[in-house]
Image (cartoon, rainbow, N blue to C red):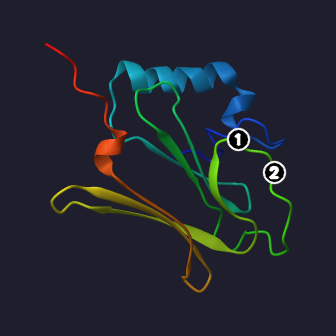
Amino acid sequence: VSSIQVISQTHGGEKWMNFPLERERLFKLIRDTKANGVIILSGDRHFAELSVMDGEVGYPIYDFTSSGLNRGRQGWRYPEQNQHRVQIMHYGDNFGLVEIDWEKSPRVSLQIRDIEGDVMIQQKFPLKLLQLPPTKP
């Protein structure tokens, strides 16, 4: 969990890219510890979006951004640059929901919902997508 976005590189606000050595250190930590299943939850953008990149950790890294339930920007605004963006909710109060279905083959569901609870952004994928390839003995 991070108070600022980890993946986004180009917008003018606070982000881990403002601290490139620390950002690389985070990705290196994930690589070196062979951590599986990493999903980053971030906020403080006053809108919601989902970004994904490889991060050179061996599997895709998702950065799932939502803002405080009552802190979304109310008027539409032009989306800021983010070459890793998969989906965006431009305006309105929102909250994020992460669900993991552990039955049979575990599946992750990332959702952004608006103030009425309607799904505005959704991404589902098998948890095994966030696994390092098996190492050879």
Front: mark 1 or 2: 1
Query: Residue at 64% across / 42% down in the picture?
Result: 84
**Above or below 112: residue 51:** above
Q: List the residue tagged with mark 1.
A: 83
Write down the quadrant of residue 98 in the picture: bottom left
- The disc at residue 80 is 2
* Residue at the limit of the structure toward the top, as seen here: 137
Query: Residue at 31% across / 36% down in the picture?
Result: 131
Name the element at disc 2.
loop
Q: Residues within 10 Å of mark 2 (few under 14, many from 20)?
A: few
Residue 125 position in % (x across, y down): 38, 55
**Above or below 62: residue 131:** above
Q: Residues within 10 Å of mark 1 (few under 14, many from 20)?
A: some
Residue 111 position in % (x across, y down): 50, 66
**Above or below 128: residue 48:** below
Q: How far separated are the C-alphas under marks 1 and 2?
A: 10 Å
Q: Amino acid at mark 1?
A: Gln
In the picture, measured across the screen, residue 97 lies left or right of residue 103, that is: right
